[in-house]
Every structure is written in C-alpha cells, then in structure tokens.
Amino acid sequence: MQTVQVGTKKQDVETTVAFDKSTFWLLDPNGKTLKAFPYSSIKAAEYSYSKSPRWKNVGSGAPLVTTGSGNKHWLMVQTQSDYVLIALDKDNYRSVVVAFEVRSGKAVEKVTESK
C-alpha cells in the first residue's frame, strides 16, 4: 500500500505511478485516474526520507503529515493549485524519482532533515 494524500484527505490505497509523453499520472488498481498533472503545470517536485515529509518550502501549501512508523520515502508533486503526496515503496523509490526527472524534464529536489 502507498499512502496518498490529496488535499486534506489521506488514504492508503494501492497506486501506480505512470508517465506518458506529457503527463504524470497516479492510477488506482483498476487503472482509474486519481491524479493527472501535465508536466507543463508542475511547479515543484520534492523527495524526502523521514518519518514525516520534510519540505524545503512549507509555506508553499505543502502538506504536513506524521506517521507512527519509521522513515518513509516521500514524493510530493505540486502544481500551482494542487498536489499529490506519495509514500513510495522502499524497493522502487529511486526508479520513480529518476523516471519523474527523465520524463518531466524537471529536477526533483532532495530535502534532508535539519540537524
């Protein structure tokens, strides 16, 4: 299961991250679109590995989430008016981040915990 947060709703759902020529997709197990962001509308993408997501710019409307378990791999994709927060699987987080950068042409900012 992957944790997906859309707006104020947080739900655990099995999701598939997909990429095509012009769009970043988040699909449910039946292939139904949960979110679709054209690459041209994406203003930021951030990755963090922590118990709670760490964002470079919390004032940007980034969600604040806490989990009861250990560290997770978080990816947030943001447009001007929307976002999706995904807790990525430990086995595929690297390939998702790299695929996002290659397909979208946008760098994923790696946010580390402040010491």
Image (cartoon, rainbow, N blue to C red):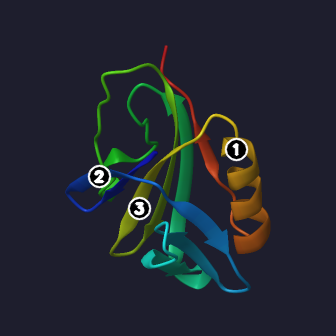
Amino acid type at image mark 2: Gln
Q: Residue at x 38, y 21 (%)?
A: 69
User: Badge 2: how crowded within 10 Å, few (<14), some, or many (20+)?
Assistant: few
Lower sequence index among marks 2 and 1? 2
- Type of amino acid under label 1: Asn
Q: Closer to the N terminus: mark 1 or mark 3?
A: 3
Q: Residue furthest top?
A: 115
Task: State the image coordinates of residue 49 (x, y, percent, origin top left).
Answer: 55, 30
| Residue corresponding to mark 1 | 92
> Would you name the residue on which mark 3 appears?
84
* Crowd around label 3: few <14 · some 14–19 · many ≥20 (10 Å): many
Across and down, in percent, residue 39 comes to 61, 79
Whichever of callouts 3 and 2 sits on the residue coming sooner in the sequence is: 2
Which residue is farthest front?
Answer: 30
Q: CA distance from mark 1 to mark 3?
A: 18 Å
The local crowd at label 1, few if under 14, some if 14 to 19, many if 20 or more residues have their Cα within 10 Å, is few
Query: In the rendered image of this protein, does residue 110 appear above or below residue 99?
Result: above
In front: label 1 or label 3: 1
Cβ–Cβ below 8 Å for labels 1 and 3?
A: no
Tell me: 14 left or right of 108: left
Q: Are marks 2 and 1 in contact (CB under 8 Å)?
A: no
31 lies above or below 90: below
Residue at numbered disc 2? 11
Residue 97 position, x and y percent, is 69, 52
In the picture, measured across the screen, residue 74 lies left or right of residue 90, that is: left
Q: For the view shown, which residue lies furthest in the right direction? A: 102
Q: Nearer the viewer, residue 5 or 2?
A: 2
Instruction: Identify the element where label 2 is drawn.
Output: strand
Label 3 and label 2: CA atoms lie apart by 12 Å
